[in-house]
Structure formats: structure tokens, C-alpha cells
Image: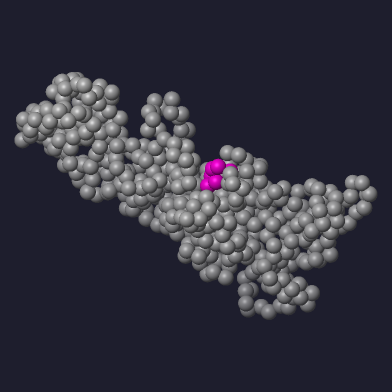
Amino acid sequence: MLVTLASLPFMAQQTFAQSADASTDDLATETSEAPSSDAAVVEAPVLLAESTTEEMDPQREPSEALNQPEQPVAVSSISSAAHSSVVAVSAPVSSVAVSSEASSSVAAEIAASSESSAFPRAENIDLKEVVRSPEEAGESSSSSSSVAVVNEVVAASSASSATGQSKVILGVEVAPGTAARLVWTPDTVVAGLAEQTPVLVVNGRQSGPTLCLTGAVHGDELNGIEMIRRVLYQLDPEKLTGTVIGVPVVNLMGFRRNSRYLPDRRDLNRYFPGNTRGSSASRIAHSFFTNIISQCNALVDIHTGSFHRTNLTQLRADLSNESVAALAQSFGNIAVLNSRGNAGSLRSAAVRAGIPSVTVEAGEPMRMQGDIVEEGTRAIETLMAKMNMYGRQNKWQRSAPVYYKSVWVRANQSGILFSRAPLGKRVNKGEVLGTVTDPITNAKSDVVSPYQGRILGMALDQVVLPGFAAYHIGIQTPEAILIEEGLLDEEDGDDVQRTPSQDTVNDLDALTRPQDMDDEE
């Protein structure tokens, strides 16, 4: 016996909810007369959506509408998430017109799937595939949804062999062994003009930690965007242990304007973890922190230098925190600078929330630097290997140099800065780093390093004023200095006692307060 709309009371009620009172009475009469013993009743919580104009015509008699040829019906899955809208792909009504036995089987599978998960399941996609435009894909207005959701019965059967766990992110379930593109929408947007920020998720076949990668918290910092793309797009969910969540462009509003800041000129990285009743920046920060960062077991926030400055590829981490220090040791041979960071930065807020977090500083803003991107990508891949998430780790890799103190060396006169020392150079106390020349009087003054250390960051050649922060010098501990100078082997550890020069000890003791971080995150 064929299943008709009359045998689907919940769906019929939703379809004709907007009809006239008289039409509603007629519909109820016809529904009660329809046989139901052989019909498959679908009890999954679904709503009819995107009905055609003919179906919703209040002038048409219900009996006439029921006698019309069956039309395809799109089914919208209900999600409790406030920040993601989801559209499910279902079969047309005509495909439901099958024998009662087949209908009962399908209904049973759907009911079982509904009981297993209250969230729509994301379609498994290949992140490397180019996303087609809505016109090419033939999408309707529902193309603004966070992710297309496939038939839950099929998705459930395909994930049955997975030993990992499904992750519910932004109200969407991502099955183990799959990848998905979702979107996060801040709470502060004007209705209909939502800034839908892409969120990439790769959920591994095996259970494990959740690593979050964030880029472009400052909208003009491009290197991190490409690092995240390279890391996420080369992951195979079948070989991944745990989950990787990547947000290449956090500050989408700033990114579109080529600006470090939000449209109101606020620095988003000064407002975490945010406040639901604060400024617009604070509310955006709260939404992002609550919906994304709270899912993380570890966080890598990627930045560049700011305002015509560049940074050596380095980590910034609060090494007084044991879990953060352990995380910082897993990136391979790149410099590590001990820094708690700004109190309102994403990194600091995450650490206070119990999430081990570091910042990767790499390169300069407004540019995509291939060598810098490659170095940062390699560091993140090394981290994932040491976390036993993906790939093999190099057991013979040298440990990273650690700089527990740092200082900015500043210009003492106005003029144009001409650098002599390159980024990353190890410099001695009293070494000339650059010269500032007055273009009118021809007066010159040298910028001299007051400490032995390494140039971790520097200003590009430009016009400067007195007090301008020109060179960021990282200073190592006495033991680290001895290791670099070849006076102490790394394997000797604490068994060998060597004493550095008194000048070095005095220099380190003099740096007892946090230094100004002109390029800080």
C-alpha cells in the first residue's frame, strides 16, 4: 500500500499550518479517514521547509492539494545551536511511496539514528577539494547554512567501524574518521548580514586530544592563515588520532578590510575571554571563546609582527606553567620566548581556563612569506607527531633555544633607520644593530645592543622617532649561553657546573620586570 501525506500526520500538520480555518477542518477530516494500519509513520523530529507556492496556496482545497502529483520536499533538521543553521538532504516524497514493509524498515533506521544523536551529522568531505560556488552547485537560499548534512542513516552506517568519538561542534556532529567545514557567527552581527567565519574540523578515526589552531586574530596577519590551510588540508582522518579544529581567519571583519583591528578600532586580542554584556569586541571574544576554544585540549594561536615589524619564527609561552612548558617543548628546533602575554590575549585567557596554549610569532603583517610559512607549518606538524596525533616524530631533533628574558632596544634620535644586523642574528653586548640618520642635518646615531642575545624581532627600515622600539633582543639563561658557545654539552645537563661571566649574570639579573612588547600578539 502506498504511503500518502495523509498518513504522515505531523508533517501534514506542519505543511498546512498556515491554511484557513475551514481548510484546516477539511484536512483534519481527510486525515482521519485515511488508512493508517499499513502506513509507515515517521516519528523523527522533522519539519517541512521550503514548500512550493502551490502547496501553501490558502485558496486551494486540502483535498485538491492532496491529489496533486507528489513534489520533492526538503527536510530541515532542528539544531539547538545558536550559531549554526543546518540543512539536511532528504529524498523526495515520491521515494517514500513504497511498500509498507520497506517503509517500516526505513522508519526503524531513522528512529534508531535519531535516538543515537540529537545533533545533525556533518557530511564527510575532502578539504583539499575546491568548494564550488552556490551557482555551480545549484544551491538554494539554504547555501548559507554552516554545513550540508547527509542522510543520517547512511552517515551512521559509514561511521560504525570507527573507534573514535563523534565531536559536536557548533551544534553539528562530526563523526570519527571525517572532515567538515562549519561556520561560526558572532553574536553582534546585524540580522541578515552575518559574518560567517569558516571553521575546519578533522575528526580522527582514533580517539585523542583536540588541538585548536587559530590565525588572523589580527586581520592583517596572513602567514598563519596559510599555515593552518597547509596543516589541515594534508590530514587524513583515517590516520589521525584525536581532533584538529582550525580557524584560519578569526577576525574576518578586519581581514576583509586589511586591518589589524575590528571595525570599531578595538584590538580583539585584548578582550578574551570576553563578556556577554561588554563592548562589541568583548562580546565577539566571548562567543568565539565559548563556542570554539572551550573545545580545545591545546591551543596554538598564530601571529606576526605588527606595524612594519617582523619576527623570527618563535614560540611565546608562559614557561612557569608546567603544562604550557611541556607543550612548548614539542615544536622542534624553533626559538622559545618566556612570556605571559597580555592579560586579554587569547593565549593568556586559554591558559587561565586550563587549556595549555602558546603563540607562534612568525614574519611580518600584510605579506605572505613562503619560507616563514614553511617553517611554521613544520613546527606544528612536529607538535602533532609528539602529541601522537599524526605522523612520526624525529627522535634526534635538537631542542629549541629558550629565552627567559627579552628587551627592546630603542632609537635615541629621529630619522630613518638603517639596519645592519639581520633578523635572528646572535649579537654581543655593545654590537651596533643599526643606524638612525637625519635626512636633513645628516646627523647619525648608532643603535647598540646592551646585552648579549639574539634578535627575535626588529623594525623594518623606516622613519623613527626617539624612543622607537627597533630591535627585540632575547636573552638566554647562563646555562643556555654556555651550551650555545660550546662550553657545555646538552647531554651534560645538571651534572656539569660552569660559571658564565659576571657581566652576563648582571645583565640577566637586571631584567627583573616584564619588558614592553611592542609587537606582542
Please, is residue 506 above or below residue 324 in the view?
Answer: below
Q: Quadrant of the N terminus?
A: top left
Q: Which quadrant: the C terminus? A: bottom right
> Is residue 103 depicted above or below 461 in this figure?
above
Q: Is residue 357 left or right of residue 6?
A: right
Please indicate whether residue 188 sits to the left or right of residue 157 in the image: right
Judge whether residue 303 is colored magenta. no
Instruction: State the residue at coordinates (93%, 49%).
Output: 442
- What is the number of callouts on the image? 0
Above or below, comparing residue 387 to residue 513 in the picture:
above
Would residue 486 appear left or right of 412 to someone viewing this image?
left
The residue lying toward the viewer, choosing from 357 and 128, is: 357
Q: Position of residue 282 (x, y in %)?
A: 52, 54
Q: Which residues are magenta?
A: 249-254
Residue found 66% across the figure and 42% down from its top = 367
> Which residue occupies 37% across, 41% down?
85
Residue extending furthest toward the right: 441
* Closer to the camera in the image, 257 or 58: 58
**Is 83 in front, or is 432?**
83
